[in-house]
């Protein structure tokens, strides 16, 4: 990877259309089912925002057998140097990896498999200029994190295993990268000290789900239900693109979950 290129500089993403079964997606806190039409509308707006940000979007077909398969970030990781096939920590999602494998083998020269027996979800992985942070969680165990760290090293990158706060689904539920030096974080994750080497922008109390924002090239995509966070980032000079996440939020999801993002050389 060129040292001059930021880790949030992308020209390629993969997304997957939501299935009608998405209404049965996993959730830790039941706030009612989303509607298929609502999820589809949020997903369509997400794709449009990606294209507006200058990214080429590959849209994969829906998988009715896998309600959570719209969240393509969990079964795989992608970097300019190659892809890593993961093993999701939720049993109902393990089969998603095989479904996305042919696409990744077609697009990447190097595709690594996470060795057995550990588990790791892409939602627990935050790529920063300093390291690839892997958060231990209910979906990413120590064995999986260590195996993933070895795979990341094979791609020429440095990994760092960190802790996710108790009761938080994924590491990136509570954080996102804003620029090369700054992270957006909940107060509970910031208190853990994992971002001591970064400038920490703390989410306003009561808007914690907004922490799963997404920097893509020159813009920061943020859930539109979080006005104080949007106002804060706007005042700090970020170009904010608000996107509706009301429906996907009902199935424990946010903006980063819905795409695999990388800079594809020679596109």
Image (cartoon, rainbow, N blue to C red):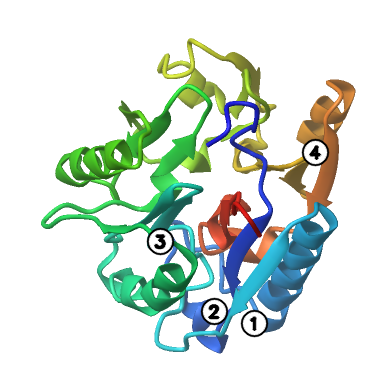
Q: Give yes or no for contact between labels 4 and 2 (Cβ–Cβ under 8 Å).
A: no
Which of the 4 image quarters holds residue 50?
Answer: bottom right
Q: Is residue 259 visible?
A: yes
Q: Secondary structure at mark 4?
A: loop
Q: Disc 1 marks which residue?
A: 36
The disc, 3 or 1, on the residue closer to the chain's N-terminal end is: 1
Q: Secondary structure at mark 1?
A: helix
Q: Disc 2 marks which residue?
A: 23
Q: Position of residue 88 (x, y in %)?
A: 30, 61
Which of the 4 image quarters holds residue 200?
Answer: top right
Between disc 3 and disc 2, the foreground one is 3
On residue 183, the disc is none
The disc, 4 or 2, on the residue closer to the chain's N-terminal end is: 2
- Separation of residues labelled 3 and 1 (CA atoms): 35 Å
- Separation of residues labelled 3 and 2 (CA atoms): 35 Å
Q: Give yes or no for contact between labels 1 and 2 (Cβ–Cβ under 8 Å).
A: yes
Q: Disc 4 marks which residue?
A: 218
How dense is the environment of label 3, judged by Cα within 10 Å: few (below 14), some, or many (20 and up)?
few
Between disc 4 and disc 2, the foreground one is 4
Between disc 4 and disc 3, the foreground one is 3
């Amino acid at each position: 990877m060129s040292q001059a290129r930021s880790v949030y500089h992308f020209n390629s993403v993969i997304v997957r259309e939501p299935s009608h079964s998405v209404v049965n997606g996993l959730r830790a806190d039941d706030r009612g089912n989303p509607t298929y039409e609502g999820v589809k509308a949020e997903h369509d707006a997400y794709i449009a925002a990606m294209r507006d940000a200058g990214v080429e979007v590959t849209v994969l077909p829906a998988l009715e057998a896998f309600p959570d398969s719209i969240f393509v970030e969990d079964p795989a990781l992608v970097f300019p140097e190659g892809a890593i096939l993961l093993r999701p920590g939720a049993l109902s999602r393990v089969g998603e990896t095989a479904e996305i494998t042919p696409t990744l083998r077609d697009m990447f020269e190097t595709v690594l498999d996470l060795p057995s027996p550990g588990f790791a979800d892409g939602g627990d992985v935050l790529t920063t200029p300093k390291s690839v942070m892997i958060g231990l969680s209910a979906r990413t165990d120590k064995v999986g994190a260590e195996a993933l760290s070895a795979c990341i090293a094979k791609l020429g990158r440095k990994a760092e295993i960190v802790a996710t706060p108790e009761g938080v689904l994924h590491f990136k539920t509570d954080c996102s990268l804003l620029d090369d030096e700054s992270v957006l974080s909940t107060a509970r994750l910031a208190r853990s000290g994992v971002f001591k080497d970064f400038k920490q922008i703390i989410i306003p109390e009561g808007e914690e789900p907004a922490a799963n924002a997404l920097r893509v090239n020159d813009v920061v995509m943020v859930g539109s239900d979080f006005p104080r966070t949007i106002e804060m980032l706007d005042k700090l000079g970020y170009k904010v693109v608000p996107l509706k996440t009301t429906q996907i939020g009902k199935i424990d999801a946010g903006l980063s979950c819905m795409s695999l993002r990388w800079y594809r050389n020679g596109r």
